[in-house]
Amino acid sequence: MMLAGIAVGRTRIRCAIGTGPGDVHATAGFPVTSPDETVDRVTRYLAGQQERYGEVTALGLSCFGPLGLRPGEPEYGRVTSTLMTRWQGYDLVGAVRRTLDVPIVLDTDVNSAAMAEWSAGAGRGLGTVAYLTVGTGLGAGAVTGGRPVHGRAHPEMGHLPVARHPSDEVAGRCRHHRDCLEGLAKAGAIAARLGWSPSALGGLTGADLDRLPGEAVRLEAWYLAQLTTALTYLLSPDRIVVAGVLMAVPGMLAALRDATVERLGDDPGVTPVVTDIENYLLPSPLGGRAEILGTLALAGAALAPVRSE
Ligand SMILES: [Zn+2]
């Protein structure tokens, strides 16, 4: 059983072929240009790999959202709305199928990464695993019973409404809500608060991150703890796996653990979390590879029977 995966990012598209996240035979990455050109390059690469590794039986596909994920609806398989205008309304699944006509499972970038953590990472084999990434953007996904969580549309956990810190006077940077979690906690928000000149994407570079003041780290953790607390109360995950450039800042994970414990307080309902926070909030062992590895897990889940636990 050979599986393929494609992860569409804003600047780079990645692909992989293998039998699962733990057994990858080949990977490749290409710069993102026009949608058709980008997808054609990656699907032709994968089609060529079949001669060496065998015919692909299913393909996992992840992309930045929002995406149409409900089969049968007109929006299914499409990038429904994005700041990247050339991709707006693009029929991603249809484009991949032109070259690789196999069962295709589409999901969000963060749900794909959550699948990788559940399948081969820090949440391996557990019942419910959440994944949170914080960088130029902020997003979270979740897997329960081996399946990514979505329903009418797909979760957009980064847009969680949050309380603003009393000391924070800088305007939130979400273009939909201003003051949601992403608007207050993505890299561009930190840069704005510090008076640093943010790049066009509103990001921080590695050099900036090394000189992030402790106060900024604690404020970031204070915001992020509102999502880890919400995840705890809404999903009761076995693990929350964290990733992204901001989570790699020295002291950030420890600050997030502290802030989460403080916010959960003495509620006996969450004692198992509070008393074992080091094993609850964990860094991703997969790093930047989580999303592409997750596409192989998505493909594998497409062929496996639905678990009923
Ligand atoms: Zn928002």
Image (cartoon, rainbow, N blue to C red):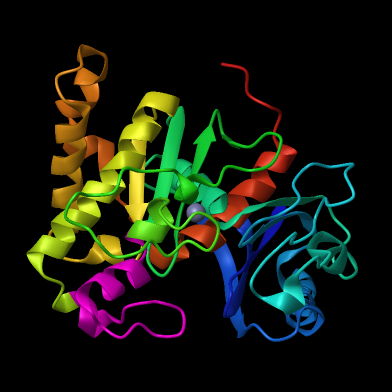
Give the answer, above or below, for where 76 lies relative to 304: below
Q: In screen coordinates, is 166 left or right of 135?
A: left
Which residue occupies the foreground of this view, 309 or 247? 247
Residue 19 visible? The answer is: yes
Image quarter of residue 152: top right
Picture quadrant where residue 38 is located? bottom right
164 or 122, nearer to the observer: 164
Q: Going 29% across and 65% down the picture, which residue do you hit? A: 170
Question: For the point 72% across and 41% down, which residue is it?
Answer: 302
Q: Residue at x 14, y 50 (%)?
A: 254
107 over 88 or under it: above or below:
above
Q: Identify the residue shown where x is 20% and y is 66%.
A: 249
Total numbered circles? 0
Residue 262 placement (x, y as % from top left): 14, 34
Whole-percent x, y for residue 64 in the image: 61, 62
Residue 20 visible to the viewer: no
Q: At which x and y percent is residue 55?
A: 80, 61
Whether residue 253 sits left or right of residue 294 in the image: it is left
Percent of width and height locating residue 10: 58, 75
Read off the magenta span: 185-209
Position of residue 42 relative to residue 74, above or below, is: below
* Horizontal side of residue 1 vs 165, given as left or right: right
The reply to whether the magenta stretch includes residue 273 is no
Q: Residue furthest left?
A: 214
- Does the segment drawn in magenta span residue 208? yes
Q: Which of the image's four quarters has the C terminus?
A: top right
